[in-house]
Amino acid sequence: MFYDYLINSLGNEQAKQYLEANQQAILNIENIIKEENIDCDFEKLNNYIFTQSNDEVEKIKREVEAVNLLGGNAEFVNKIDIPIKVNKMNEIKDEIIKNENKNINILKPVLAAIKFPNQAQFNSCKYMLGLTNAIETKRGMIYENSKVIYVQKDGKQYIVKTEEGSVSAKYVIIASHYPLVNFPGFYFMKMYQETSYLIAVETQSELFEGMYINSEEPSISLRTALYNGKRILLVGGMKHKTGAKISLEEAYKNLEKVARDLYPDSKVLYRWNTEDCITLDKIPYIGEFSNLMPNVFVGTGYKKWGMTSSNVAANIITDKILERDNKYEEVFNSKRLKPIKNYEELTNMVKEVSYSLVINKLKKTDEYINDIKKDTGKIIEVDNKKVGIYRDKKGKVYAVKPYCTHLGCELSWNNLDKTWDCPCHGSRFNYEGKNIYDPAIKDLETLNID
């Protein structure tokens, strides 16, 4: 559990800073919405973390104690207002990896839950549009389609180079999801990216109130949203490290199974997936980018808490530029060099980088271009060089050099989204080689295959 982890990792003072910063961010967002008259379906709801496993009950209790010790408001409950009788979600823990196509059944009762009252839910797209309108009303300027290629120091200022031109600035804020500047900073050694999935579901049944997520792995989140004047169900989860060499085809099917178990008449309207940057100690990096780049600031590693963390980042960085103290900046210090507690993920990241940068490149493949079925992709060898091949539904072949343009890791084929994904740092490219996810900036080199 997170706050119990923070207390053990950072101590009470900084754990309290983290809690207060995120609670204050909810109030800040609510005030912005009111002041700017933003219509984004904002509402206050209870949030629950529940378990259906006996092994998790004590963890739930410790987390409640931790939150309340830090001055928060958490309640231990053994019932939740959701049509869940029991969920064997832990039975699908290895489903994606093993591709065993197990069933997800709602069979056991909820044993315990943490209740967090008065948490916020709103439409992030509507909120963002409201913010852009407010900025432009106040004579601010926003430029789209201006992809930044690099940031370079030029005397007392910085040159921000884009594909269409350059901008000179005294201050630079790198809020590009994953930092696009590798050196200095070395954030690629301190973060990884995780992919998770979500479906939007329509049902004729009356939906529950509140937001819910289970504490076991794999975690499944349940919440609602307004769509065309009607409340719909959002089911998310099935997370995995981006670029993992696993079968992904069951990800959406598992979420759909959860939805149908809850509401048999469920109809899937939309489905999508995205990536989240996660730091090795689970705390965002917010503040100065590096001692070697004064006046450059960063906000990244939000760990799926992007709504509140982005507000926290905005206030800390604003205060840094205006040379004001911020009582929350210490816990998020982006230059921190504290011991990393997440040894397991650190080991996994080092291992994956080693394999993708060196070992996998040396491995031979027995696959041939004729072995690749339509609408699938693989890495094969052509003239003793590895080539990434995708054959579309009509049989047309697309060939790329299968090495990430970020730091050169060997890519893996994602047959669910038809993309080339980097297992090292989470960059993604479509089958034509076009870069679609950071930290890579350049497209893949395309190849002509006869």
Image (cartoon, grey):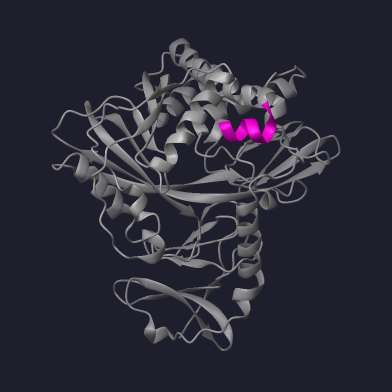
- Tell me what residue is drawn at x 57 percent, y 69 percent: 445
- Tell me what residue is drawn at x 60 percent, y 63 percent: 352
Q: Is residue 338 left or right of residue 393?
A: right
Instruction: Residue 118: give x, y in percent of width and height.
Output: 41, 17
- Tell me what residue is drawn at x 67 percent, y 48 percent: 190
Q: Is residue 61 above or below residue 249?
A: above
Camera-side residue: 181 or 9?
Answer: 9
Visible in this render: residue 139? no
Visible in this render: residue 313? yes
Q: Does residue 145 show up magenta in the picture? A: no
Instruction: Residue 166: give x, y in percent of width and height.
Output: 69, 43
Q: Of helix, strand and loop, which mostly describes the magenta segment?
A: helix
Q: Is residue 271 above or below residue 64?
A: below
Camera-side residue: 312 or 208?
Answer: 208
Instruction: Residue 77: give x, y in percent of width and height.
Output: 36, 24
- Tell me what residue is drawn at x 36 percent, y 48 percent: 272
> Which residue extends farthest top?
35
**Quarter the C terminus occupies:** bottom left
Q: Is residue 318 above or below residue 157?
A: above
Residues rendered magenta in the picture: 4-11
Camera-side residue: 53 or 403?
Answer: 53
**Mark count:** 0
Quadrant of res 235: top left
Q: Is residue 211 left or right of residue 231?
A: right
Quadrant of res 55: top left
Quadrant of res 373: bottom left
Q: Does residue 9 show up magenta in the picture? A: yes
Q: Is residue 297 above or below residue 255?
A: above
Camera-side residue: 141 or 189?
Answer: 189
Instruction: Residue 89: give x, y in percent of width and height.
Output: 33, 48
